[in-house]
Image: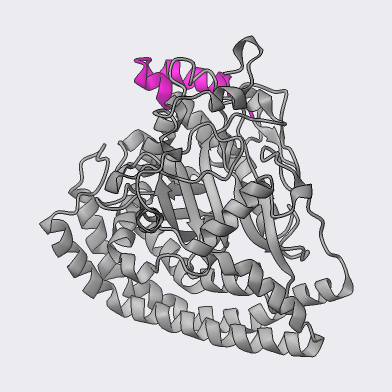
């Protein structure tokens, strides 16, 4: 790509129909939405963004999806007051709730997670996917009943979160008379309200927990799930996406790794295939599993069962005591179930789609709401030096509150933009190492090549430029060192 002065976008446009299967219409819209896990209002929304340029619903924001949308923080008195009110009321509710519920939820999960660990022990390293055989369904039924007490307590926690969300949220709205703002914020949420319900996908969740246990072990998964059940709904609805307190809108941010053109020299989809294997394989061999377990972000998007192009997946985010598990709905671009390969791509600099990761508003167990993609990038138009880099564009519902909009905020699109700028170079390092191992090089040779080409970015709003330093030995305080990988 880019050789002889050709544009990455031009090369993409010139791809044959066979190579661009994601644009080929083979089934009716209702069938496609069922297979892909889509909703009519969400697809109408994202297509309206694409028609307006790709960045947002405003044509003035342009079509350059290789850089973040311009965004300012609201430092007005009311916005600061809302942020303080949010944190005070969060402490008033969450501290006593965690003191009462955390230990019971943790202990009640032990029988179910122990059974999952036994299932994991029966899987061979290198297993690509968990087959849904008769034994799988027997195992799922056992885990369902073992996990039921913990699940009931998690539902009780969720219902109580809703009660206090309404009490605190409506109180603030009434006291500040921001009824019109609430209505506008509700409209921003609307496209993401009616995604596939997680209660109808419990076997998917079981498969995801199996994969995460393969990566992170039983005790860590116990902790991560406990935090997810008790913390994530409040983070999502009350802190990150609260129409009663904040003026919500759609915000675009994108992270692109430094170039992986060396990996894709012989096969333009090579990095995509390796990345998919790392993220979707059920059980890794020990060496990779140990490395992945040290990452600050561990995504696992299992391959969908027959008859669907999407499935529930999980992400571990954070470090130490603050880490949580997160649930997502993921559509896999390489699946052709139901004779469908069609997959709408929102990014204008996508080279070939790999994943669409949906953060539905009706999924309480992910702290964001929006549409996310993951795939190799052309870098067009503002980051051509990152061609073939891993791209992670995100169209999120967020606010301009100082609590969630800055890169230094405790949460929100700004902080997650920085988070992925820090993590993606680590993922790129593993992709490059794996590529050279598959090419027949020894562990030492592959590791040296990956280390020599390691490069980070200067994380910033707009465009995160590649640092001039190339080589892991130049990064004494790199993410790789932070994760204990060197």
> In this orientation, which residue lies closer to the viewer: 324 or 200?
200
Residue ranking furthest to the top: 4
Which coloring applies here? Answer: one colour
Write the residue at 59% across / 86% down: 164
Write the residue at 54% across / 81% down: 161
Magenta stretch encompasses residue 155 = no
Tell me where residue 31 appears, x and y as whole percent.
35, 56
Write the residue at 35% across / 76% down: 151
Image quarter of residue 104? bottom left
Image quarter of residue 412? bottom right
Rendered view: 371 above or below 380: below
> In this orientation, which residue lies closer to the viewer: 132 or 306?
306
- With 178 as the anchor, is 380 left or right in this view? left
Dominant secondary-structure state across the stretch colored magenta: helix
> In this orientation, which residue lies closer to the viewer: 14 or 200?
14
Tell me where residue 348 appears, x and y as whole percent.
61, 38
Rendered view: 176 above or below 389: below
Tell me where residue 453 appears, x and y as whole percent.
58, 21
Residues rendered magenta in the picture: 434-455
Q: Is residue 486 visible?
A: no
Write the residue at 16% across / 62% down: 137
Image quarter of residue 20? top left
Tell me where residue 282 appears, x and y as whole percent.
30, 45
């Amino acid at each position: 790509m880019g050789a002889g002065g050709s544009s990455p976008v031009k090369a993409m446009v010139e791809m044959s129909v066979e190579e661009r299967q994601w644009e080929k219409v083979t089934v009716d819209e209702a069938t496609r939405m069922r297979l892909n896990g889509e909703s009519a209002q969400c697809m109408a929304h994202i297509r309206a963004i694409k028609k307006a340029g790709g960045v947002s619903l405003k044509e003035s924001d342009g079509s350059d999806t290789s850089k973040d949308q311009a965004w300012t923080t609201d430092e007005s008195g009311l916005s600061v007051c809302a942020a303080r009110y949010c944190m005070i009321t969060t402490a008033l509710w969450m501290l006593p709730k965690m003191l009462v519920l955390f230990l019971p939820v943790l202990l009640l999960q032990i029988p179910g997670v122990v059974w999952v660990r036994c299932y994991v022990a029966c899987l061979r390293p290198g297993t690509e996917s968990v087959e849904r055989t008769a034994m799988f369904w027997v195992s799922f039924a056992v885990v369902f009943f073992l996990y039921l007490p913990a699940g009931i307590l998690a539902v009780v926690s969720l219902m109580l979160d809703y009660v206090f969300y309404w009490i605190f949220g409506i109180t603030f709205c009434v006291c500040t008379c921001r009824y019109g703002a609430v209505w506008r914020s509700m409209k921003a949420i609307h496209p993401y309200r009616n995604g596939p319900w997680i209660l109808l996908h419990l076997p998917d969740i079981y498969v995801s927990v199996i994969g995460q246990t393969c990566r992170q072990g039983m005790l860590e998964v116990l902790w991560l799930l406990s935090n997810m059940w008790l913390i994530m709904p409040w983070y999502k609805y009350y802190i990150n996406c609260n129409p009663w307190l904040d003026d919500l809108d759609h915000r675009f941010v994108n992270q692109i790794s430094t170039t992986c053109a060396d990996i894709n020299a012989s096969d333009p989809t090579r990095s995509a295939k390796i990345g998919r294997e790392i993220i979707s394989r059920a059980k890794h061999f020990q060496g990779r599993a140990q490395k992945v377990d040290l990452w600050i972000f561990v995504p696992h998007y299992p391959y969908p069962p027959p008859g669907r192009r999407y499935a529930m997946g999980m992400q571990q985010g954070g470090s130490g005591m603050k880490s949580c598990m997160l649930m997502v709905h993921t559509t896999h671009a390489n699946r052709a179930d139901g004779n469908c390969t069609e997959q709408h791509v929102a990014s204008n600099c996508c080279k070939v789609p790999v994943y669409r990761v949906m953060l539905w508003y009706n999924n309480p167990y992910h702290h964001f709401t929006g549409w996310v993609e993951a795939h190799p990038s052309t870098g067009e138009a503002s980051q051509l030096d990152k061609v073939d880099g891993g791209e992670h564009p995100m169209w999120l519902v967020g606010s301009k509150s100082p609590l969630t909009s800055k890169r230094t905020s405790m949460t929100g699109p700004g902080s997650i933009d920085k988070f992925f700028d820090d993590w993606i170079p680590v993922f790129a390092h593993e992709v490059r190492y794996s590529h050279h191992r598959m090419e027949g090089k020894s562990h030492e040779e592959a590791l040296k090549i990956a280390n020599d080409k390691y490069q980070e970015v200067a994380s910033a709003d707009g465009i995160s430029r590649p640092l001039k330093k190339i080589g892991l030995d130049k990064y004494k305080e790199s993410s790789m060192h932070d994760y204990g990988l060197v």
